[in-house]
Amino acid sequence: MESFLIKGGVPLHGEVQISGAKNAVLPIMAATLLTAEPCVIRGVPDLSDVKFMAQILTWLGAKVDVHGGTVRTQAKKIKGQGDYDLVRKMRGSICIMGPLLGRLKTARVSLPGGCVIGARPINLHLKGFAALGAKIKIESGYVEATAKRLVGSAMFLGGRAGSTVLGTANVMMAAVLAEGVTVIESAACEPEVIDLAKFLSAMGAKISGVGSPTMTITGVKELHGAEHEVIPDRIEAATYAIAAAATNGEVTIKGARAEHLHAVIDKLREAGVVVERKGPNLLVRRNGRLKSSDVTTLPYAGFPTDVQAQMMALMTQAPGISIITERIFESRFMHVSELSRLGADIEIEGPSAIVKGGKPMSGAPVMASDLRASAALVIAGLTAKGTTKVNRIYHLDRGYENMDVKLRALGARIQRVEES
Ligand code: EPU
């Protein structure tokens, strides 16, 4: 297993190029199962999650070639069920269920378990499939959806925390090949869902209302092959913006789409960070002392849960009290104890973390628990005095392309080492 060794205290300076969005590319790769024709996806980040999804598609019978940021697939003949266990390993792969159900009218996958950020149920995905006429069976750790025919209907897909991103994606991918009209109320509005809808439309699907809570899908008989360029990763862009602010640096974030980052930019400005839009780029610069700031995560266009941990790392640097409230995943605070090892003063009170910022931070060995928690630890390590060792960085490699290389180019003293 590998770790990052970070010598903190260097302000980041320069330019960083943002890669394609992990959470857009995974469902788009799954969507290629909807047609027997070839598909091409460009701007694909080099991530272990992408390799993993490629393995799943291959296992299902598709031809998949991942090369130089382009994924080429052709799913001439695929199987809808079998003894595949891969879904349990990567939760994002649950989104193969919608395309399998849409194309083959049957899908069987191992039930994804919970993970460190929370329970992560799929009841809303299944509610949507059932509304399209599928029979759902859960047995021996597997979930199965089967239908003689899928028929469009109106459904409400809101849950305890609001809309569901992959639930919306999954139901959308089944509904594009259902008979008649499907209306999803409380549909997710995330840019990644819009990107998927764009790809599906390029394949011949008929979808309207994308990006609003009411999405309407008129089923078609079949879809054809398509090409697509994935949107830039707004979470990666936010992570580098926060790293620039935390280290008192100045960084141009190339290809960050400001229109996907309103909530993050707003909070950074509230915290005293200068964020300027320069065409397709963002210039992020610290303007003196940071100010404390309260943040609550919400579905899009609210503050993203995937940036909560990184924002907390930033708020450890801001004198005063910041209250960070997590409204999407109930236990997404695994980074708190590790940030505390570096000297942060944070207390958890129900769904909120109370950060008493401005305390001196010093390097220590810390353990990455999930993808975004790991990013928060890297940011904290970049600001801390001395050396921080972030263990288990395979979590980071799931969702950040070459993070160590990109940070080194910005002047950070960061090395990838084999864990001893
Ligand atoms: N929920 C239900 N029932 C469901 C589905 C979700 O109650 O059937 C609840 C969840 O428990 C949670 C909320 O709804 O409280 C929102 O979860 P959502 O379904 O939107 O999450 P997801 O689709 O499983 C995606 C991203 C996550 C990101 C969330 C929220 C991918 C591959 N994953 O997950 O990304 O945090 O949306 O924006 O797109 C990450 O990249 O680090 C990551 C975890």
Image (spheres, grey):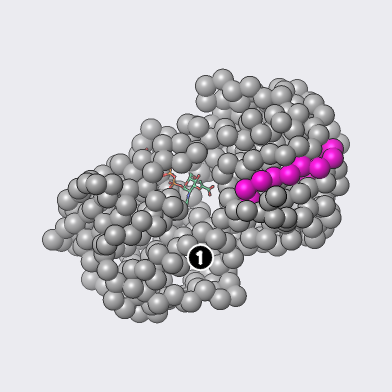
User: From the viewer's perspective, is residue 129 above or below residue 41?
Assistant: above
Residue occupying image coordinates x 70% and y 29%: 340
Residue 363's image quarter?
top right
Read off the magenta span: 382-393
Residue 309 is inside the magenta segment: no
> Picture coordinates of residue 220 (x, y %)?
25, 68
Q: Which residue is drawn at 50% across and 32% down?
A: 331
Judging by the rendered image, the residue that carries numbered circle 1 is 51
Q: Where is residue 80 in the image (x, y as percent from the top left)?
A: 26, 64
Is 385 a magenta residue? yes
Instruction: Please determine whether, in this image, residue 319 is positioned above or below residue 28.
Output: above
Badge 1: how crowded within 10 Å, few (<14), some, or many (20+)? some
In this view of the protein, can residue 291 be seen by the observer? no
Question: Which residue type does callout 1 highlight?
Answer: Lys
| Residue 10 located left or right of residue 352 | right
Residue placed most toward the observer, 214 or 417: 417
Looking at the picture, tell me which residue is in the foreground, 21 or 401.
401
Q: Which residue is drawn at 84% across and 33% down?
A: 289
The image quadrant where one finds ligand 1 is: top left
Q: In this view, does 384 lie above or below 206?
A: above
Residue 172: image quadrant is bottom left
Residue nearest the observer in this picture, 279 or 392: 392
